[in-house]
Amino acid sequence: MFREIELERVQRKSGIDVWFSIFMILFMGMGLVALYSASVGYGTSMFDDPLHFFKSQVIFMGLGFVAMFVSMNISLDWLRSKVFVLSVVCLVLCLMVFLPFVGKEINGASRWIGFGPVQFQPSELLKILFPLFISNLVDKRKNELNVPGRVFYPALIFSGVFCFVVVLQNDFSTAAFLFVLALLMLLMSGIPLRYFIALTAVIVPLGFIVVFSKEHRVYRLLSFFIPDYDVSGASYQVMASLKAIGSGGFWGKGLGLGVKKLSSIPMVQSDFVFSAWAEETGFLGVTSFFIILALFAWRGYKISLGSGSLFSSMFSFGCVSAIVLQSLMNLGVVVQALPVTGITLPFFSAGGSSYVVTMIMCGIILNISRNKIKETVNE
């Protein structure tokens, strides 16, 4: 796809994409309202403060705007020149979760590093690093995409190393998400399809080995294929989610009036916040969400295709795809189209690391939107 675009007359400077900014802000506003309504009960029971999660999210939103402003104005040439250094830094941070007194284990997973009350999930940074690394690699070797040892294999080794470290953190869902994102970018770069077909012979059995290496993953897989397998355990959260979504009807029960979020869905403010949104806003709220997601994706991909270089086109494509793919994976879980994962819903779920990284990716997309193609030939 991107290989077919040859830029003979390159870029002119312009302002940031206004429409993408509008759709992003709409997403943020909708997410903040949904989180507030979904988290009041848990905020009260866990922290004796109904606004606990809402106030935290507002702080993360502020930090996200600062991070977005930086990424919106950073030099992309400088950023790609530091790709090796950034890769090493991310690898070190991901390994730091295993250090005593630094790494924080929560719910059986070692995904966080923290000092005092401040915690951060290093694997979130990989959502930016993967598009950066692959975009840089493809752009530098764009004339050698048919040679697997020049682009395809190095990208797989890079992705495999980081995904292996993330799996060691007991975070299979994030590892799977990152690997799918890498494959999507490689596929769109123009690498022959036969390489991906051959790869499945390795990936499928390896995936089963990883899944069956942990008992809770097996239970989640069984509950996905057999919903009645463990209705009070592995299937409980998803079944409660489906009931909440179904109870919303056309108009919804009204913001703040949902009952399933309090009585049925554990930690609804995190991975299952969309269930509470669907219960309270009904079909209209769900439809509004998908419309904004579609518009967000459309404008983001339009920026990608209208960028001034192969690198920036692929980089913005990777950032947009990371946000959209993560959203679809989360929604797939809450409607039982996918096995339960720990993937959050961008702009909606409580969590600072994910929110700030999502804002950084939006800043990169807006950064790239400033460079427009004057004329595209050989499309």
Image (cartoon, grey):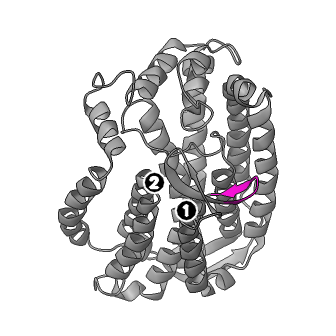
Q: Quadrant of residue 329?
A: top left
Disc 1 and disc 2 in contact, CB within 8 angstroms: yes
> Which amino acid lies under the numbered mark 2 shown in the image of this protein?
Asp
Relative to 18, is 23 above or below? Answer: above
Give 185 or 166, whichever is nearer the viewer: 166
Please state the horizontal and vertical placement of residue 245, each as a whole percent of the image: 50, 20
Please state the horizontal and vertical placement of residue 140, each as a whole percent of the image: 47, 87
Please state the horizontal and vertical placement of residue 183, each as a whole percent of the image: 37, 65
User: Magenta span covers which residues?
Assistant: 114-120
At a point 55% along the width and 78% down the height, the residue shown is 87
Left or right of 242? Residue 75 is: right
Q: What number is the disc on residue 171?
A: 2
Majority secondary structure of the magenta segment?
A: strand
Q: What number is the disc on residue 144?
A: none
The residue at which mark 1 appears reads as 123
Relative to 340, is 276 above or below? Answer: above
At a point 77% along the width and 48% down the height, the residue shown is 61
Give 146 or 330, whichever is nearer the viewer: 330
Secondary element type, mark 1: helix
Picture quarter with the C terminus: bottom left
At a point 76% along the width and 31% down the height, the residue shown is 47
Relative to 197, is 155 above or below? Answer: below
